[in-house]
Image (cartoon, helix red, strand yellow):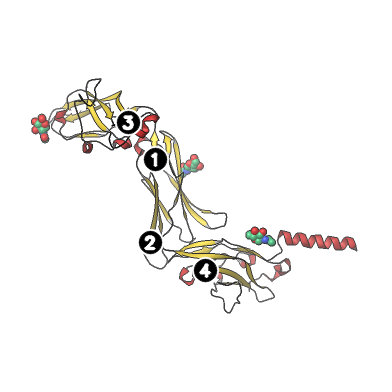
Amino acid sequence: MAGTLTFLLISSLLQDALCGTFNISMPQNINVLRGSCVTIPCSFDVESRFEDNLDDTCKAYWSDSPLFSSRNAKLKPTKEMTGDLKKKDCTTTFNNADFLQSTKYYFRLECNNALKYIFSQAGVDISFIDVPPSPTLTPSTLEVKEGTSVSLTCSAPAPCWSHPPALTWSPNLGQSQETLQENQDKTKVKTSVMNFTASHLHHGNKISCTAVYQKQDGSPDVTAETSLTPDISSGTWGIKMPQNINVMSGTCVTIPCFFDVASNHKINLDDTCKAYWSDSLPFNSGNAKLKPTKDMTGDLTKKDCTTTFNNASLLQRSKYYFRLECDNALKYTFTQAGVDISFIGEGGSLS
Ligand SMILES: *[C@@H]1O[C@H](CO)[C@@H](O)[C@H](O)[C@H]1NC(C)=O
Ligand SMILES: *[C@@H]1O[C@H](CO)[C@@H](O)[C@H](O)[C@H]1NC(C)=O
Ligand SMILES: *[C@@H]1O[C@H](CO)[C@@H](O)[C@H](O)[C@H]1NC(C)=O
């Protein structure tokens, strides 16, 4: 007798511990974009003896106090708005969140049988926001060596599952892949992963991710943006420009040019840096043949030494080298490579 009783006790305790008790699980809070829909992820459990009471007659109710009935419930979602209650899924979608208020909501289950219960164990705090939060970029900063494979992830909360935000990259540097992912509390986030190979061309140029949220009440879309400015280096002195350029005398010429400095000189790249070009080595700012102004060169702080000469007649048929001089320790002539300037006569042919 005593053995049987102990067995019954233990088995009932086990049942209670495994499932078998009234309980509910939902996020502690959800930020709802005003004018947009919202889905509250929700799952519950009932006492074992009520398992069989979970049937098609069960209905969901929500209200802003832990004490209410089906009659005075503030929110009475239809079957289409809720998950499968028979499967203990109380996930509820409000297409028009205007029915909600910024308050804490509790869930009540009522079936046409003995099962009627308010899950006061936990509620969800609904907060309304007018501006969506900025998407999250991972990593949030990018400092890599040239040639590295980079994978950038942008994620933005998606409180309305049927209309998640649209994510766009600017500039779009490669293939990107979008997914709707689940957080630990079952709320969702839209993510976009963009892969690309780091190039000196990306250095110092802002990469941004924009999330566009569609409203369900007809009001205009709202957007949120996050960006980072990549720092891409080779870690050593170097320069990239064409080996030679054919120019027509009297016309304008642009020399595309990108340089890199040794890691310890990176902090010296500032607004005091100036560009110089000359065709005889060595040279310095004093005896340089060409001293382009700031508006003739690219952004030197972004390692862009692209230079435009409005009148190519200033150049000679020769090989030109680039020198950088800043009002600090950074003064360097890039002798690794130069550009050969050749002239084609007016009416001349390139063939
Ligand atoms: C009830 O659910 C909460 C959240 O899911 C969980 O932390 C807790 O352990 C559960 N309680 C019982 C008695 O199952
Ligand atoms: C992007 O890179 C990640 C990690 O290297 C990889 O798992 C993923 O498949 C790549 N995605 C695309 C679209 O190439
Ligand atoms: C370019 O410079 C040359 C020599 O200084 C000059 O003769 C010519 O008129 C200039 N051309 C233009 C378009 O400014």
Reading the image, the residue beneath label 3 is 259
Instruction: Tell me, yes or no, whether the two marked residues, 1 and 3, touch with CB atoms within 8 Å.
Output: no
Q: Is mark 2 on a helix, strand or loop?
A: loop
Task: Give the CA separation, mark 2 to mark 1.
Answer: 29 Å
* Residue extending farthest front: 328
Screen quadrant of the N terminus = bottom right
- In this rendering, position of residue 26 left or right of residue 22: left
Instruction: Tell me, yes or no, whether the two marked residues, 4 and 1, touch with CB atoms within 8 Å.
Output: no
Q: Does the residue labelled 2 lie within 8 Å of ligand 2?
A: no
Task: Give the CA separation, mark 4 to mark 1.
Answer: 42 Å
Quadrant in the picture for residue 44 = bottom right
* Camera-side mark, 2 or 3: 3
**Ligand 1 positioned in quadrant:** bottom right
* Camera-side mark, 4 or 3: 4
Q: Which mark is residue 221?
A: 2
* Residue extending farthest right: 1
Q: Which of marks 4 and 3 is nearer the N terminus?
A: 4
Q: Which of marks 4 and 1 is nearer the N terminus?
A: 4
Q: Nearer the viewer, residue 162 or 293?
A: 293
User: Residue 277's spot in the image, x, y percent?
Assistant: 23, 27
- The residue at the point 39 percent across, 36 percent down is 232
Picture layout, residue 73 above or below residue 15: below
- The residue at the point 55 percent across, 54 percent down is 183
Reading the image, the residue beneath label 1 is 230
Label 1 neighbourhood size at 10 Å, few (<14), some (14-19), many (20+)? many
Label 4 neighbourhood size at 10 Å, few (<14), some (14-19), many (20+)? some
* Residue extending farthest bottom: 71
